[in-house]
Image (tube, coloured by chain):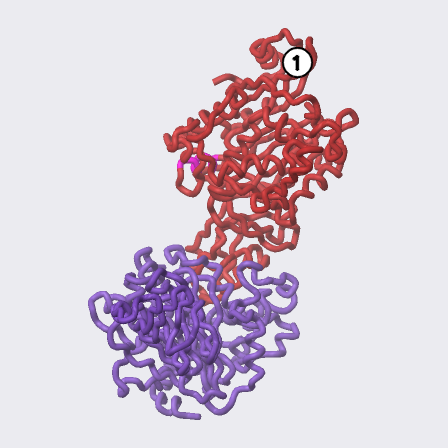
Amino acid sequence: MLTSEENELLTRTGPGTPGGNMIRCFWQPVALSAELPSGGAPVPIRILGEDLVIFRDERGQPGLLGIHCAHRGADLSYGRIEDGGLRCIYHGWLYDTTGRCLEQPGEPVGSTFHERIRHRAYPCHEAGGAIFAYMGTGEPPLFPDYEFFQVPDSHRWVHKYFHECNYLQGNEGNMDPSHPFFLHHFLPGSALQRSRVPVDDHRVTPAYNQEVHAPLVRAEEVEFGVRIYALYPATDDWTDVRVSHFVMPNTSAVGGGPVPPGDGCLMNWHVPSDDTHHWRFSMAFKRSGPLDPRHAAERASVTGSDYRFARNLSNRYLQDRNEQRTDTFAGMGPIFVVQDSYATETAGPIQDRTEERLGSCDAGVALARRMLLRAIQDVQEGRDPPHVIRRPEQNRLEGVRVTEERIPASMTWDAYRKARSSDREPTPSMR
Amino acid sequence: MLTKAENDLLTQTGPGTPGGQFMRRYWQPVALSAEIPAGGAPIPVRLLSEDLVLFRDEKGQPGLLGLHCSHRGADLSYGRIEDGGLRCIYHGWLYDRDGRCLEQPGEPAGSTFHERVRHMSYPCQEVADVIFAYLRQGEPPLIPAYEALHAPADHRWVTKYFNDCNYLQGNDGNADAAHVPVLHGFLPGSDLAARQPKEASFSGPNYVGRQVTMLEIDSEDTDYGTRIFHRQPDGRGDATVRIMNMVLPNLCAVPGGPAGSGDGYLIYWHVPIDDEHSWRYAIAFKRSGPLDPDLGRRRTSVMTPDYHLTRNKSNRYLQDREEMRTRTFSGLGEIFIVADSWATETPGQIQDRTQEHLGTIDRAIIAWHRRMLAAIRDCQEGRDPPHVVRSPEHNDMSHVLVRADAADPAKTLDEYRQQANLRREQLTVQS
């Protein structure tokens, strides 16, 4: 539970808000590379409450500018890609990717007016099939070198989904290892489960097809965010431990997606469009080899060409009561991200966290909020928040690995945590 | 660029606002005559943020009343035209054009209650197939006798278009002839380049080679608003000079429409629906003879029956990127009103003019905004603003002079302007 003031701090990310200033300290995905094919049209996007246009110039470089022409405010996303930049179709003003105004055809010969225009522009970086932008002030930090960016294209998958709610409740869904046993549960004998593209030879998609039971959840703060442990009794003698992460400030690294357990991860970046809508950029990779391309098709099948869900708030997610009796727990088809949409969006455009009741399975959620509130305070007091990477030696992010392994049932969480930290992970240091 | 306070003054026109009181000093178009045919239904109209009902009584006279019945608020636009007025279908109250309540069938015989009800009503006049209303108490002024309003019916063409934005940015576009060769440019070598409108040098592909177009613009204050002089070389050694007018409080008289230069002109009247939506009334005429009846049909081909453009914000104006490569600069088709709607609507519902950067070509807009602000100040100080016409002898509008002429390229704009002033009488009486 949060106070109303805390909830406001965490959920408001428009220009000039404390939360917005904090999130703007980090690189954020703003578009998929596939949205900007070479020679394609500019795309209007709204990110962090700002209306922007993203385009690819003739050399293939992405640029992100304020959507309204500096002249008289017309929409630059209708512009022409030519002559080294983006040209407004109203009076022909031409901008490059850095926001310089190169031409103003209507002004007199010799005019220097164009040199005095500096249009709003944000630095872009293209990696892993997505375009990232730095919307903060000052020198951008280093681009975080997650393992996702290091694997070959064939080993990874990226997509985005539009959610009709605040970004934070979207990301909090990732920090909760308990809900899959209910929300994503397939009933015994499920035909929809068999219809899914299998994740590897051994398992048919993440198997919540056992008796419904919830894990024991523990969480701790690490340098880059919050580490969440979920402990599942496997047999009388063994316990399965899955480790996932909240990653500052609006990302998670979790198991699942098209990735076999422990062989990569799914990173979900929940990027505010405005305070009541956000984009989920899903980026998954398989460490050991190429992903089955059928995964991409399966996961894109739930969205239209505009990356919005066919099953959504306006049609009650096409929930099917008959399916609930025979096949799935939720009655919303077999694709988990649809069920997650229901869970995160129906809490309201901005969830009122003065009215929630967190339990033991929400330990990660509670810790992540504390860390975010401290990060906002850091920025208000002029410091970099945690996980803003300025030096190359800080950019070794093996700690973000998502793991799944089996430990003796007699081993306590604390013993496992210490053994895991000392044995396998040189980097994370406790705060 | 305006301050926020200035922008608010110019764009807010609801009841009680300074801009609204200014607009209410003048007659405003409220509907086309064709919208209320004899025997037709009343129509709900929203004008200057007031919800009203417009109807034609049994004698054919237009009436404009408050939309909500004085009794218990039901919508009078569902009412019956009968017995000398408009009758509410809820309890049968009957109103005449002046807002008098003629009957209250549910009240006891002999009741004088109806005599004490005075429903909101505004005076109407029908001129040039347009119904005008005066939304203010007190003696209305005269409707200015623009030549376009008094041309014979078959010399005249009127329609209206919905604009999904504040009225002012629509009218600002009329003060800006510099956009024409850019936004409305046809690409050299395309099939359209051969199909120039009458003022070929003006509407043609002056964007060839993206040369600076060497526009010259000047303006002067007049008793009716701002007169604009505009000289534009065509890049082939000739030049066009235009004289056009921004007319208080929310209209313009400009070259264009179906008549050739000097043989008529076009009035655009940008009427606030509310602060975020407006109607653009178009009134065109040809002085020398009847208009081609097909012309109106061609122009309305881009509209739905309720005067909305089929290419609009919601479908991104059906911009065609292939057309941008081969035929038009904007990809918005060859009917200029579509591109003009794009230009006026995409700066936002109410353009934030604190963020614009006006250049040399925009000096007429700057002069026009100053003229409007001075007129608003007149109203605030209790005076009639300019161009409120109260006597027939002051209602000669022949000096609302509109020209588009091929000009001697050797002559400066100033020389031309002096000549035009000298020849004003001669220019306006020619037919």
What x and y, as percent, mark residue A57?
59, 52
Residue B219 can be seen, yes or no: no
Is A21 contained in the magenta span?
yes
For chain A, what colour was chosen? red
Q: Which residue is mark 1?
A: A239
Which one is in front, A207 or B406? A207
The quarter of the picture where the C terminus of chain B appears is bottom left
Question: Does B204 appear above or below A49?
Answer: below
- Give the class, few, some or many, for how many residues have Cα within 10 Å of label 1's Cα (few <14, many ≥20): some
Question: Does A338 appear above or below A37?
Answer: above
**Which secondary structure lies at badge 1?**
strand
What x and y, as percent, mark residue A123?
52, 43
Is B97 contained in the magenta span?
no
Residue A43 falls left or right of residue A157: left
Q: Residue at x 37, y 78 (%)?
A: B84
Q: Chain letter for mark 1, please.
A: A
What x and y, as percent, mark residue B33?
45, 78
For chain B, what colour was chosen? purple
Q: Quadrant of residue B139?
A: bottom left
Residue B5 falls left or right of residue A95: left
Q: Residue at x 68, y 33 (%)?
A: A325
Residue B359 falls left or right of residue B311: left
Amino acid marked by disc 1: Thr
Furthest toward the front, the residue is: B109
The quarter of the picture where the N terminus of chain B appears is bottom left
What x and y, as percent, mark residue A387?
51, 28
Q: Quadrant of residue A287?
A: top right
Residue range in magenta is A18-25
Question: Does A313 appear above or below B160?
Answer: above
Q: Quadrant of residue A4?
A: top left
Which one is in front, B28 or B330? B28
